[in-house]
Image (spheres, rainbow, N blue to C red):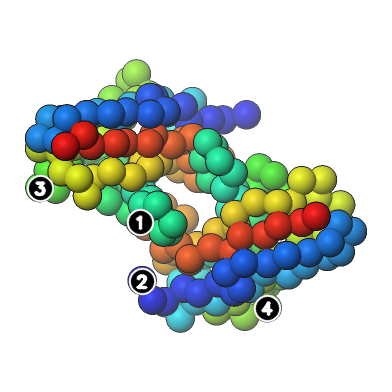
Amino acid sequence: GENVEQHPSTLSVQEGDSAVIKCTYSDSASNYFPWYKQELGKRPQLIIDIRSNVGEKKDQRIAVTLNKTAKHFSLHITETQPEDSAVYFCAGYSSASKIIFGSGTRLSIRP
Amino acid sequence: DGGITQSPKYLFRKEGQNVTLSCEQNLNHDAMYWYRQDPGQGLRLIYYSQIVNDFQKGDIAEGYSVSREKKESFPLTVTSAQKNPTAFYLCASSKGDSYEQYFGPGTRLTVT
């Protein structure tokens, strides 16, 4: 079946450095790619999303890039801060396979 | 965080019993979803509903059942046929399929 693979599963970066999380998808009909952040003990919340007609989207320190040819998309967090520590999930949506989530990346920010 | 609620927060059941998890939303969203979250794994889709009185199976529907009699409510029943029911269950809603999903606080189910 269709799937979304996410790497790495854990990531530790120094405060102030950048963090990059990558996802690949198999369903070429996928057209919507959200990223969710889940802090410990809390519900997932959308932080940024991108649709297939756009190659890049930025929101302050967060950016997402999409390469439809290679079927992969990435989350970039710059100038990381302690409150960025959380589990991040990517997802891909198509009308056929519906929404499929990646397995998550646990991001830790070292002081 | 308001708008979508789940109850209870923690639920304990004996093996062989059916249990129903509640999910209610007041966001006027058409679409609702149920996910299961296990440690080290992503969110796996159990069932989803795009409109009242209609729902479809997700990737791991076996052992679960749902109903969608009202737009606001999408209860999930974990039946005794579910072989490994202990997990964290998340409900979500959205105004449509390819839109932001709003998640409830989750129900942690433990079956012994």
The answer to whether residue A106 shows anywhere in this view is: yes
Report which quarter residue A89 is drawn in: top left
Kindly state the secondary structure of the residue where label 3 is placed: loop
Q: Residue at x 27, y 51 (%)?
A: A47
Query: In the rendering, which numbered label is found on residue A60?
Result: 3
The residue that label 1 is drawn on is A45
Q: Residue at x 41, y 76 (%)?
A: B3
Do discs 4 and 3 belong to a common subunit? Answer: no
Query: Is the residue marked by circle 4 packed among few (<14), some (14-19), or many (20+) residues within 10 Å?
Result: few
The residue that label 4 is drawn on is B69
Q: Mark 1 lies on which chain?
A: A
Q: In this view, does B2 lie to the left or right of A65?
A: right
Q: In this view, does B18 lie to the left or right of B60?
A: right
Estimate the x, y position of residue B26 in percent, counting from the top left.
Answer: 46, 81
Task: Tell me how far mark 4 sits from mark 3, CA to CA.
Answer: 41 Å
Q: In this view, does A18 lie to the left or right of B49?
A: left
The answer to whether mark 2 and mark 4 are in CB contact below 8 A is no
- Quarter occupied by the N terminus of chain B: bottom left
Estimate the x, y position of residue A90 in percent, counting from the top left.
Answer: 39, 39
Do discs 1 and 4 belong to a common subunit? Answer: no
Q: Which of A12 and B80 is in front in this view?
A: A12
Q: Residue at x 62, y 29 (%)?
A: A1
Query: Is the residue marked by circle 3 packed among few (<14), some (14-19), or many (20+) residues within 10 Å?
Result: few
**Mark 4: which amino acid?**
Glu
The residue that label 2 is drawn on is B1
Estimate the x, y position of residue A22 in percent, counting from the top left.
Answer: 33, 27
